[in-house]
Amino acid sequence: MQARVFVTLKNGVLDPQGKAIENALRGLGHEGVEKVRQGKMFEIELADTDADSARERLQVMCERLLANTVIENYRIEIGGQDAS
Amino acid sequence: MKAAVIVFPGSNCDRDVAVALHQASGTAPAMIWHGDSTLPDLDLVVLPGGFSYGDYLRVGAIAALSPIMQAVRRHAERGGAVFAVCNGFQMACEAGLLPGALMSNAAGKYVCRHVAMRVENTDSPFTGGYDAGQRISIPVAHHDGNYFADDATLDRLEGEGLVAFRYDNDNPNGSCRDIAGILSDNRRVLGMMPHPERAADAALGGTDGAAMFTSMVETLS
């Protein structure tokens, strides 16, 4: 089973890399780029066959390692379906 | 004082802090590999600076899951002292020994220089050798030293006197409320971004950090 986990910075948490990318996009001449926030995406292949239990396990993985919930939010997608 | 320095793959200040402890106490600390799962009976555990696991995923995140960290957590829960410097501070936050998190420096740059900081709390095994409000100069060397916690946590840290050090009009990383170092609730765990072990001998260009090591030796022995 294929899963994706998206980890993004919480609102209000400073993102210097996102800011630099935003400025670089403007520097390339792209108009109307109002804000860029950088995040991470993990592709995870699981041996699970049950989507519900896979989601539960992924949630534990996010809380324990993939995200730091002091500063980050996470979203889980299983087989292309948003399951957060 | 029975002290140990934990060595992680990518630690690079483990020997510096061992030399500073040795000079202050007359005894060399034990050097313990992160893959070990038990600690001997200790007065002090040091989580040293460096770039454990190449800062993969998030600074300190992988190291916080090393086998030895369960033993470090048990040591802290028993009231044992933990001195966490730079990457060690990042690990201590990731491991839940201290609240908050260390983020990328606000300017997006690695900073390596002496900074001015103020001693805010002198009532801990680490800071008893200073006067309250004393201004000291200690080097920093980090890319991710921007201390972040929500306002409720920051208010609590300040209200309970758990801010150990603050940058004194010289914040190199954009940390919340100029915080450079914090203490745990029982004041037995200290996390700080600046490196006192790099300012503990005149040959290194400064001695403002030496009082921390003599204080630890006096209080924890």
Image (spheres, rainbow, N blue to C red):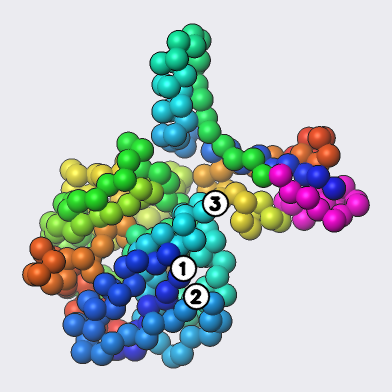
- Comparing B147 with B158, the one in front is B147
Spatial separation of the CA atoms under disc 2 and disc 3: 18 Å
Identify the mark at residue B57; answer none if there is no mark. 3
Residue pictured at 18% horizontal, 59% vertical: B138
Provide the residue designation for mark 1. B9
Q: Secondary structure at mark 1?
A: loop
Amino acid under disc 1: Pro
Query: Going by the image, does B73 lie left or right of B51?
Result: right
| Position of the N terminus of chain B by quadrant | bottom left
Name which residue lies at 35% across and 43% down.
B105
Residue A44, above or below B68: above
The spot of residue A41 in percent (x, y) is 64, 40
Report the front residue among B21 and A47: A47
The type of residue carrying mark 2 is His
Disc 1 packing (10 Å; few <14; some 14–19; many ≥20)? some
| Sequence order check, earlier mark of 2 and 3 | 2
Give the residues in magenta: A43-59
Of the pair A21 and B181, the residue shown nearer to us: A21
CB within 8 Å, label 1 to label 2: yes
State the mark number for residue B34: 2
Q: Which x, y percent locates residue B74?
A: 52, 79
Chain of the residue that carries numbered disc 2 in the rendered image: B
Instruction: Give me the residue at 46% from left, 45% from top.
Output: B150
Mark toward the viewer: 3 or 1: 1
* C-alpha separation, residue under disc 1 versus residue under disc 2: 8 Å
Judge whether B42 appears above or below B187 on screen: below
Mark 3 closeness class: few <14, some 14–19, many ≥20 residues within 10 Å = few
x%, y% of residue A73? 61, 41
